[in-house]
């Protein structure tokens, strides 16, 4: 049962999406071509999760909506400067940098998964787009293999930056953000930004 000083931030779907996406991407990233079937199914799961999360960004609970965490470029830059100076404001939902990271991760993962599906069709003549290719297409396979690998690695880099940001913000505001993504609750403090500046 939540304490009176806590506020519900992350709904059950957002929490499920977060940890399911972490698991699916990790499996896909480390299986690659050695376990192609597992790699492919993990990739399909990532794409399905992204599509549902995209819809939830418009119809979901307050802190899950894109309108709550998409900020202007100026606000994001100022927040990053304040963070480097260890004086960033605390946000109940996603802060400006966190919101930008979510958009970047979703875009990178979308390109990674769709390019992977095209690659599977062009190179292996398998998957949902296999019918698009009457025979293995080496030119398209080479192009989409490079694209797929680049964005998979770019996503991994974004994850590392994201983890560093979570660690830094947890230290600045003395709260466990990872635990909040498990329980759904954060402390309701007076120095927290509730009504956020929008672009």
Image (cartoon, rainbow, N blue to C red):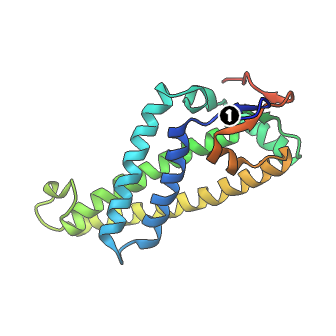
Q: Where is residue 102 in the image (x, y as percent from the top left)?
A: 58, 43
Decide if residue 151 is in sight here.
no
Q: Which residue is identified by label 1?
A: 93
Query: The N terminus appears in which quarter of the rendering?
Result: top right
The residue at the far bottom in this view is 34
Q: Residue at x 55, y 27 (%)?
A: 61
Q: In which quarter of the image is residue 167?
A: bottom right
Q: In this view, does 113 lie to the left or right of 188?
A: left
- Given residues 107 and 53, the one toward you in this image is 53
* Dot 1: element: loop
Q: In this view, does 55 lie to the left or right of 191?
A: left
Q: Which residue is drawn at 33% across and 60% down?
A: 41
Asked if residue 11 is positioned above or below residue 148 in the image, the reply reads above
Asked if residue 156 is positioned above or below residue 196 in the image, the reply reads below
Query: The C terminus appears in which quarter of the rendering?
Result: top right
Q: Where is residue 197 in the image (x, y as percent from the top left)?
A: 72, 23
The residue at the far front in this view is 1
Asked if residue 133 is positioned above or below residue 87 in the image, the reply reads below
Q: Which residue is drawn at 82% across and 35% down?
A: 89
């Amino acid at each position: 049962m939540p304490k009176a000083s806590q506020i519900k931030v992350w709904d059950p779907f957002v929490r499920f999406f977060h940890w399911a996406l972490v698991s699916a991407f990790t499996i896909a990233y480390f299986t690659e071509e050695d376990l192609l079937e597992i790699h492919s199914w993990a990739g399909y799961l990532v794409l399905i999760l992204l599509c549902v999360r995209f819809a939830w960004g418009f119809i979901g609970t307050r802190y899950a909506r894109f309108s709550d965490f998409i900020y202007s470029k100026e606000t994001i830059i100022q927040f990053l400067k304040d963070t480097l100076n260890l004086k960033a404001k605390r946000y109940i939902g996603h802060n400006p940098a966190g919101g930008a990271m979510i958009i970047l991760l979703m875009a990178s993962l979308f390109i990674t998964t769709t390019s992977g599906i095209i690659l599977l069709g062009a190179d292996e003549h398998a998957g949902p787009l296999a019918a698009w290719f009457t025979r293995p297409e080496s030119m398209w396979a080479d192009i989409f293999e490079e694209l797929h690998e680049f964005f998979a690695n770019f996503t991994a880099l974004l994850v590392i930056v994201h983890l560093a940001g979570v660690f830094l913000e947890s230290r600045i505001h003395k709260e466990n953000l990872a635990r909040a993504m498990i329980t759904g609750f954060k402390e309701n403090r007076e120095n927290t930004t509730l009504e956020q500046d929008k672009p």
